[in-house]
Image (cartoon, rainbow, N blue to C red):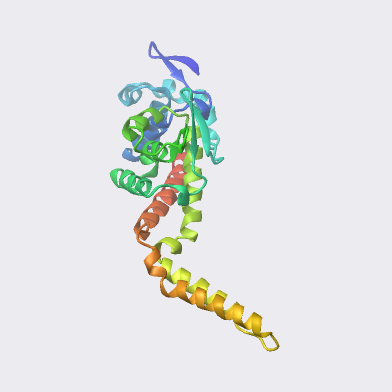
């Protein structure tokens, strides 16, 4: 952090993305959306990162405001986008499941509620998303969201460096993208099983010249696969709705577009 003085007041200014909190980044992006010109959007950037109130900047002389950007050189570089699957925060280690398939169904519901609460804005939902996805280790494995206050943890995670929070967001985005590729398993499980079963049945067709024992084994195997194919629907009693994945994918896409848009005003 760097201490600067502006209008006889001192402010702590971050000098890298590691010193910018998730809460600060949310404020910068949210405020920038409410301004209509490039000049006023720049005011939102200075205010968000330096903590100087917008009304103070508006009434300040341009010759005093313009030099402030020299203290924010780091924002000319992209926010780190290396996926983060584990991190330490306030003395605790947290781990994010390697893919969404490993999450409990109640996590899907909570993630859906988080996105609905922010009208699909993933950046504003990110504190809650991280609180839902990131778990501590326990003697039995990992926490579930029944073990802690998700809202309280989300509030704490607003203090995460944006370099870590953004990395978790990238990890989440990648997981959603990967998950949507295999989402037929959740949205149309019986159809997927039927397709795979037909493929296996084709490979189990008896061939000319095979002995009686081989033909018998192939027949038994075909009957077993046919049984699974016929009764597949009984084995799938709950699924993750397709709408969840559609909304998450749209939210993640908008989040990445929004980050690029924010940087055009730097």
User: Which residue sits furthest right?
Assistant: 209
Toward the front, the furthest residue is 213
Q: Is residue 203 left or right of residue 145?
A: right
Above or below residue 190? Residue 90 is: above
Rendered location of residue 23, percent (x, y): 39, 30
Query: Quadrant of residue 250 in the image?
Result: bottom left
Q: What is the quadrant of residue 159 in the picture?
A: top left
Q: Spot the residue most to the bottom.
A: 208
Q: Is residue 204 visible?
A: no
Q: Residue at x 32, y 32 (%)?
A: 149
Percent across and percent down for residue 168 are 48, 39
Image position of 56 (left or right of 49):
left
Q: Residue at x 51, y 78 (%)?
A: 223
Q: Nearer the viewer, residue 208 or 98?
A: 208
Measuring from the top left, give residue 242's x and y in whole percent.
Answer: 37, 60
How many numbered marks does the figure carry?
0
**Which is nearer the eye, 232 or 135?**
232
- Residue sitting at 38 percent across and 10 percent down? 8
Is residue 155 among what the camera can see?
yes
Q: Position of residue 247 (x, y in %)?
A: 36, 54
Q: In terms of depth relative to the viewer, which is nearer, 245 or 24?
A: 245
> Is residue 14 positioned above or below 79 on the image?
above
């Amino acid at each position: 952090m760097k201490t600067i003085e502006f209008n006889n007041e001192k402010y702590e200014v971050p000098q890298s993305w590691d010193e910018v909190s998730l809460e600060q980044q949310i404020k910068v992006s949210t405020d920038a959306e409410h301004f209509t010109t490039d000049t006023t959007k720049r005011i939102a950037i200075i205010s968000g990162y330096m903590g100087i109130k917008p009304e103070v900047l508006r009434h300040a002389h341009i010759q005093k405001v313009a030099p402030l950007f020299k203290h924010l050189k780091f924002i000319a570089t992209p926010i780190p986008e290396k996926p983060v699957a584990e991190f330490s925060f306030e003395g605790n280690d947290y781990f994010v499941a390697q893919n969404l398939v490993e999450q409990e169904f109640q996590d899907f519901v909570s993630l859906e509620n988080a996105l609905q609460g922010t009208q699909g804005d993933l950046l504003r939902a990110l504190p809650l998303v991280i609180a839902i996805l990131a778990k501590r280790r326990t003697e039995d494995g990992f926490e579930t969201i029944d073990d802690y206050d998700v809202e309280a943890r989300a509030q704490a995670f607003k203090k995460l460096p944006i370099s870590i929070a953004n990395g978790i967001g990238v990890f989440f985005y990648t997981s959603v993208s990967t998950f949507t590729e295999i989402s037929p398993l959740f949205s149309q499980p019986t159809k997927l099983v039927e397709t795979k079963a037909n493929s296996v049945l084709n490979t189990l067709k008896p061939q000319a010249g095979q002995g009686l024992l081989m033909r018998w084994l192939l027949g038994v195997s075909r009957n077993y696969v046919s049984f699974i194919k016929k009764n597949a629907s009984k084995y799938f009693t709950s699924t993750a709705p397709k709408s969840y994945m559609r909304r998450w994918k749209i939210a993640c896409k908008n989040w990445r577009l929004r980050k690029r848009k924010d940087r055009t005003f730097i």
